[in-house]
Image: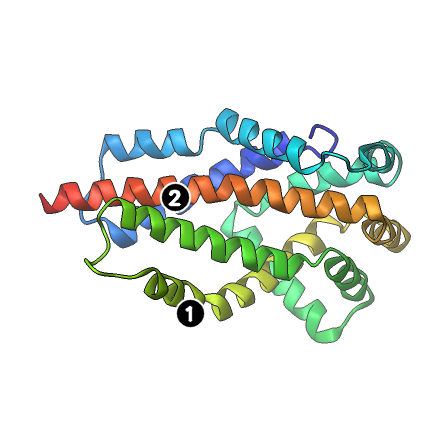
Amino acid sequence: FEALELPGIISVMSREGLDYAEQIATDLIPGDPGAAWSATIAGIYDTERMEQAALTALIETLDGANVEAMLAFYEADPGRNIPQLEVSAREAMLNTEIEDAAKEIAAEAIAEETERFLLVRDFVEANDLIELNVVGALNANYAFFTGLQDGGALPDGMSEDQILADVWAQEPDIRDNTTEWVYAFLLLAYQPLSPADIQTFTAFSETEAGQQMNRALFTAFDRMFLDISRSLGEAAAEELTTEEL
């Protein structure tokens, strides 16, 4: 957990989540949600709460895995430098101007199929990053709708099949946005790495330990975000139903 700089990543995720919650308030909730909404959202995206949820899930998902091999990679070069590069890039992309610039640079690299892009593409494919992120986003969106439904904010009689259909209809846009963001982020984060470093990282990702770690991370963070998304939906439902009253 510490070797991967996950506390730093979660800190950025918390800030991203607060921005996302504000967007939800703008899009869904009439008027100013007020102090109660802000307090609820701050609790949902509390970094200590998020860290504990992710760590607990990671311990469970790595049970029986070769954690020693994972630590060996991240305690030596180039692995020891990679997590901090990822944290720094994610922090930088909180700035919309930097994020837009990174996306533009990535789009050009993809179009030209530069050597750097091809190296990163191999890494993305070795870790199945697009598919796993798309699945995670779809599951989180479903959890959000479930929270809205549990809070009585969806139309009466709306079935689970209808919710699933609405969520699945978002898949093409989610896939496009995910692909754009993943390549922008990785090309920015791994810019200081040499081609050999990226190849070494990809090779580790293809090992049994690398695959175990990748799946465990996605499983752990998916669990965390399912809980967050459901809570966010319930909080939005509370605001919507209170507004109606």
Between residues 2 and 185, which one lies in front from this camera angle? 2
- Where is the N terminus found, in terms of image quarters? top right
Left-right relation of 220 to 160: right
Q: Name which quarter of the figure residue 156 lies in.
A: bottom left
Q: Secondary structure at mark 1?
A: loop
Residue 212 image label: none
Q: Residue 220 in the image: x percent, y percent?
A: 60, 40
The structure residue drawn at horizontal position 29% and vertical position 39%, both measured from the top left corner, is 235
Q: Which residue is mark 1?
A: 169
Between residues 115 and 163, which one lies in front from this camera angle? 163
Residue 230 image label: 2
Q: Residue 62 in the image: x percent, y percent?
A: 71, 36
The structure residue drawn at horizontal position 42% and vertical position 69%, both measured from the top left corner, is 169
- Kind of residue at badge 1: Ala
As measured in the structure, the alpha-carbon distance from the residue carrying label 2 to the one carrying label 1 is 19 Å
Q: Check the image and report above or below for 10 versus 236.
A: above
